[in-house]
Image (tube, rainbow, N blue to C red):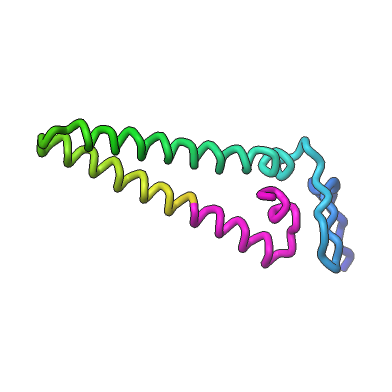
Amino acid sequence: MKIAQIDSPFKSIYVPSSGGDVNVNGTDVGGIISAILPYIFGAASLLLLVYLVTAGLGMMLSRGDPKAMQSAQAKITNALIGFVIVLFAFAIVSIIGRVFGISVIGNIFR
């Protein structure tokens, strides 16, 4: 039985068998994600900072109002949960890059 060869849509990606750099051109999905990923993490950290500052100001300006204080505490809790999610996302991306030997992922955050 003869097996027919199928054209791969991933012809532009070359992964050396001994590991190393992955050659990804900038027009495919991997290249686009590699280019955007540092900006996404940077924007998430800036939004976290802004959210924490506004929640802190809301707490200081609540003047003892229990509803305003509770709202500000909820915002701080949500901001910290978001920070943990972003931190885990960064760790997962880094671990996947190391496990599969994809050095492009490691180079994104340098």
* 22 horizontally vs 110: left or right: right
Q: Residue at x 80, y 48 (%)?
A: 10
Q: Name which quarter of the figure residue 54 lies in.
A: top left
Main secondary structure along the magenta-highlighted residues: helix
Q: Residue at x 63, y 61 (%)?
A: 96
Q: Residue at x 82, y 56 (%)?
A: 21
* 54 horizontally vs 89: left or right: left
| x, y percent for residue 41 | 55, 43
The span picked out in magenta is 87-110
| x, y percent for residue 89 | 52, 53
* 62 horizontally vs 104: left or right: left
Q: Is residue 107 magenta?
A: yes
Whether 87 is drawn above or below 27: the answer is below
**Nearest the eye: 92 or 17:** 92
**Nearest the eye: 104 or 69:** 69
* 76 horizontally vs 13: left or right: left
| x, y percent for residue 61 | 20, 31
Q: Quadrant of the N terminus?
A: bottom right
Whether 104 is drawn above or below 34: the answer is below
